[in-house]
Image (cartoon, rainbow, N blue to C red):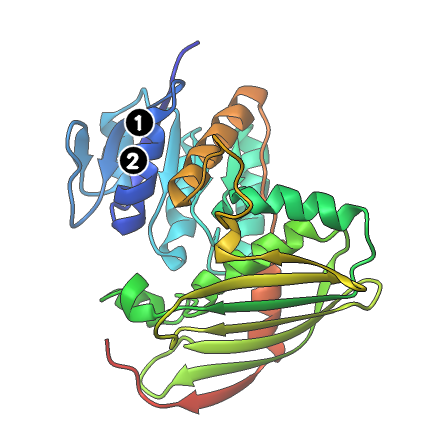
Amino acid sequence: MTKLKIGLVGLGKIARDEHVPAIAVHPEAELIAVASRNAKAEGVANYADLESMLASEPDIDSIALCQPPKFRFTAARTALLAGKHVFLEKPPGATLSEVEALISLAQEQRVTLYASWHSRFAPDVGRAKAWAATRTITRVTINWKEDVRRWHPGQNWIWEAGGFGVFDPGINALSIVTEVLPEQLRLIDASIYIPANRAAPIAADMAMETASGAPVTAAFDWRQTGPQIWQIIFEAGDERFDFLQGGDDAANTAEGEESGLSSEYRAMYRRFVSLVQDGKSEVDLAPLRLVADAFMVGRTTATDAFHD
């Protein structure tokens, strides 16, 4: 079978650490070129922008977009209009309306659009989903707390409007919960904490509930020092499923089972190639919708200035 020829746009940390290696090990995918203003990849053609890459590399089948979300719509639209399949890093866009526009355009162009949620491919997600499917969920508690200086050093874009702030990692937890629970969630209330010198939040609390009324709470915080916390507790009466370490809990990992962030990205590229081969798209907006709802109805509080 002919390999899927991929052009990568945006060569930041996540692209270098995860996208490039994931493509390299896929037997039916090949990285052809990279478009980046500030970096170059070894062993492939490099271009300053997407337009130059598309003009010079007509054999490219698909485009993987790894820029900050607020820049992604224009690039995705350009790629779709050129007849290319598109892989969107999470979150898939800065707004719901722009991603919905891309869904319609992909349908018109008859190409694949894939909105990736890497945390859904963590080993514990499938186990938690199977566990929840046979029980009545009575409560879900999310604690997602990490040190922004450790995971996003010097990334000023993430603090700008449209950069999502603490929701950039927090949306990973929401992508897990919306995958695991058999019912839809709705937001009830939110509190958003924004540093005095920034435009995006450093912390947020969310109160949600399932369609049957089970409470779901989330606490996101980028000020965590010491041990990092990526925890979701699913309760069903006296029973509980502890989703720890972002779903990569060594205690639950079976012998020979892939684990770690790299395994999640390898799984996403397997999914992307499969969707292209089947002529399908996959764009789940549930996690992004909850974040949008939090910004819409949440109470905003100014906090101390943050300096990287």
Apparent side of residue 39 relative to residue 161 in the rendered image (left or right): left
Label 2: how many Cα within 10 Å (few below 14, some 14–19, many 20+)? some
Q: Quadrant of the N terminus?
A: top left
Instruction: State whether residue 304 is above or below residue 36.
Output: below
Q: Of the numbered discs in the image, which one, if any, rests on residue 24?
A: 1
Q: Nearer the viewer, residue 29 or 123?
A: 123
Question: Which residue is found at the position 45% from the left and 36% from the top?
Answer: 86
How far across and down, in percent of the image, does residue 5 sit?
35, 23
Contact? badges 1 and 2 (CB < 8 Å): yes
Apparent side of residue 50 relative to residue 230 in the rendered image (left or right): left
Apparent side of residue 286 relative to residue 52 in the rendered image (left or right): right
> Which type of secondary structure does the marked residue at label 2 adopt?
helix
Q: Of the numbered discs in the image, which one, if any, rests on residue 148?
A: none
Instruction: State whether residue 29 is above or below residue 249.
Output: above
Question: Which residue is found at the position 53% from the left and 20% from the top?
Answer: 277
Instruction: State whether residue 123 is above or below residue 279.
Output: below
Q: Nearer the viewer, residue 281 or 258?
A: 258
How far across and down, in percent of the image, does residue 147 sit?
35, 70
Instruction: State whether residue 148 is above or below residue 288.
Output: below
Residue furthest top as drawn? 1
> Which type of secondary structure does the marked residue at label 1 adopt?
helix
Q: Quadrant of the C terminus?
A: bottom left
Looking at the rendered structure, the kind of residue marked 2 is: Val
Label 1: how many Cα within 10 Å (few below 14, some 14–19, many 20+)? few
How far across and down, in percent of the image, does residue 55 sit?
26, 29
Looking at the rendered structure, the kind of residue marked 1 is: Ala
Q: Of the numbered discs in the image, which one, if any, rests on residue 20?
A: 2
Picture quadrant of residue 78: top left
How far across and down, in percent of the image, does residue 140 sit?
68, 65
The CA distance from mark 1 to mark 2 is: 6 Å
Picture quadrant of residue 70: bottom left
Question: Which residue is found at the position 73% from the left and 47% from the top?
Answer: 131
